[in-house]
Image (cartoon, grey):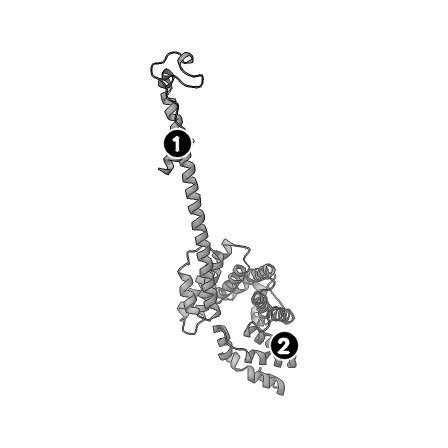
């Protein structure tokens, strides 16, 4: 009835026309059509009325569809935000398995923020002590795929660049030293892009420090292999690594036990005993919030932090 009323307003009824009228001016008003005119133009009048009605119906349908689309889009955005909020809470709480279970429900998502979190969660599951080597490999490659999709969806996401670089590095562990060295430039490029997009992200800065430390520490035989395989193999220094580790600490003090540990190790490489003791002790005393923090504390490297500090004090460098 509402639609009929609207149509009535859009297409008002024609005035009554007498049937059988002759030439209209004598019996019909100057603005009225006579019966013969109506009969003669009946088809045109019907088509005009039909087109008017269809146009109106089309406009009404368009409005309804547009409003429905806006509602669905708003609901989708709200839903994604809700999922991300839950995911961040689980991550901060150290609920690695629950986080992975939550996010894998949305693995077909097109949202970059959700996808890079799924890449991170997959990698975290891979690092759990109870994960088998076979499962770990599958999860590492799965994480890379999620990170790649996140980057494709949003190249302006610093986190997508960061996790893409991390996942490429992880995959290199399964593809040999040649692939690992070949991927080094790509990894560096994405870490640098992540820092450029978000200079306040301590993790990206720390990871750039690890990149420098790794190539500063590269064994001679790997360096020789790199020189044979590549015209200009990647290289760095401990001083460069130290600069990134300190920069990360300035951005977010005590954010990561491994950054503290690597500060100590880098100072050891540079033969600065006093500062090495300072940072190694901080790493040893750092509370474990994440699985990786726990691994730092319980791994052979973490268990020997105290011994290393004592060795530095005594000057027993052979234990280091």
The numbered mark, 2 or 1, whose residue comes first in the sequence reads: 1
Q: 170 or 204, which is in the foreground?
A: 204
Instruction: Tell me what residue is drawn at x 58 percent, y 79 percent.
Output: 282
Q: Secondary structure at mark 1?
A: helix
Label 1 neighbourhood size at 10 Å, few (<14), some (14-19), many (20+)? few
Residue at the limit of the structure toward the left, as seen here: 19
Residue 104 appearing in the image: yes
* Mark carried by residue 8: 1
Q: Is 95 positioned to the left or the right of 180 in the image? A: left
Query: Of tags 2 and 1, which is closer to the observer?
Result: 1
* Mark carried by residue 306: none
Q: Is 74 positioned to the left or the right of 237 in the image? A: left
Q: In the image, residue 177 lies at what x, y percent?
A: 51, 66
Q: 10 or 275, which is in the foreground?
A: 10
Residue 147 appearing in the image: no
Instruction: Tell me what residue is drawn at x 54 percent, y 59 percent.
Output: 161
Q: In the image, residue 240 lies at what x, y percent?
A: 64, 69
* Mark carried by residue 267: 2
Can you say which quadrant of the picture contains the N terminus? top left
Q: Secondary structure at mark 2?
A: helix
- For the image, the number of numbered tags is 2
Residue 301 drawn above or below residue 39 = below
């Amino acid at each position: 009835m509402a639609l009929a009323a609207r149509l009535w307003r859009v297409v008002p009824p024609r005035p009554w026309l007498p049937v059988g009228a002759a030439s209209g001016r004598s019996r019909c008003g100057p603005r009225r059509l006579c019966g013969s005119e109506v009969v003669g133009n009946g088809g045109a009048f019907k088509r005009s009325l039909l087109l008017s009605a269809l146009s109106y119906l089309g406009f009404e349908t368009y409005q309804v569809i547009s409003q429905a689309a806006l509602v669905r889009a708003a609901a989708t955005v709200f839903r994604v935000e809700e999922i991300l909020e839950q995911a961040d809470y689980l991550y901060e709480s150290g609920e690695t398995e629950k986080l992975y279970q939550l996010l894998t429900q949305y693995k077909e998502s097109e949202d970059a923020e959700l996808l890079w979190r799924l890449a991170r969660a997959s990698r975290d599951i891979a690092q759990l002590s109870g994960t088998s080597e076979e499962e770990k490999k599958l999860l590492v490659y799965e994480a890379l795929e999620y990170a790649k999709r996140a980057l494709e969806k949003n190249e302006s996401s610093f986190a997508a660049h960061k996790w893409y670089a991390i996942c490429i590095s992880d995959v290199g562990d399964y593809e040999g030293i040649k692939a690992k060295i070949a991927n080094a430039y790509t990894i560096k490029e994405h870490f640098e892009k992540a820092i450029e997009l978000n200079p306040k992200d301590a993790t990206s800065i720390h990871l750039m420090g690890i990149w420098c430390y790794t190539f500063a520490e590269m064994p001679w035989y790997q360096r020789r292999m790199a020189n044979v395989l590549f015209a200009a193999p990647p290289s760095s220094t401990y001083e460069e690594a130290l600069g990134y580790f300190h920069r990360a600490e300035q951005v977010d003090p005590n954010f990561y036990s491994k950054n503290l540990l690597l500060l100590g190790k880098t100072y050891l490489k540079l033969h600065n005993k006093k500062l090495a003791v300072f940072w190694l002790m901080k790493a040893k005393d750092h509370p474990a919030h994440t699985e990786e923090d726990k691994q730092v504390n319980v791994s052979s490297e973490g268990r020997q932090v105290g011994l290393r500090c004592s060795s530095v004090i005594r000057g027993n460098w052979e234990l280091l």
